[in-house]
Image: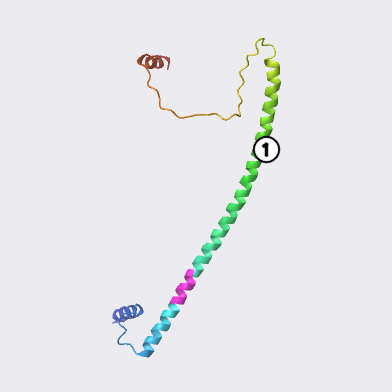
Amino acid sequence: MIKILQSDACRQLMGEQLSGLSVTNLQNLENQLEMSLKTVRAKKKQIFSDRIKELNLKGNVMHQENIELHKNISLLLQENNALKEKVHKASDVSEGNQYSHDPLNRAIVHDVFAPSNLQLSQPQPQSREASLEAIHLG
């Protein structure tokens, strides 16, 4: 009997089987629904509020980490520039000393910091002799 009453109450809460209810019972059902709805909305609001606070904290932490990373990058760039200057000064001095005795002055100097143009390419088929030679060398 209790299961039947619970089943009827659930149906009434869903808006079904209302035809036998009095005005007072309908008013009570409406009040119960409004209280339940307020509880559900309050719970939903609390969950959203907690999640917003959590995400704001994470955002602040990420912002601080971002600031630290920018500082680190700036320091690394400064160190990199200082090292470049040292290398260029050293290469200027060594070029003057190293190639001054070369009568034809045939120095091939590569700029280590110049951008290089590397490209991927398909491997070229080797001849049978080159493959055998590679096997013997390996």
Viewer-side residue, 24 vs 130: 130
User: How far across and how far down the image is residue 124, in percent?
Assistant: 39, 23
- The quarter of the picture where residue 94 lies is top right
118 falls in the magenta region: no
Give the extent of the magenta segment: 37-44
Which residue is label 1 attached to?
78
At 53% from the left edge and 65% from the top edge, which residue is drawn?
50
User: How far across and how far down the image is residue 10, in percent?
Assistant: 34, 78
User: How far across and how far down the image is residue 17, in percent?
Assistant: 30, 82
Mark 1: amino acid: Gln
Q: Counting other residues with Cα less than 10 Å from the Cα at mark 1, is it few (<14), some (14-19), or many (20 or more)?
A: few
Q: How is the image coloured?
A: rainbow
- The quarter of the picture where residue 53 lies is bottom right
In the shown orientation, is residue 108 left or right of residue 133?
Answer: right
Q: Quadrant of the C terminus?
A: top left
Among all residues in the image, which is located at the extreme top? 103
Label 1: state its secondary structure: helix
Q: Is residue 65 above or below residue 96?
A: below
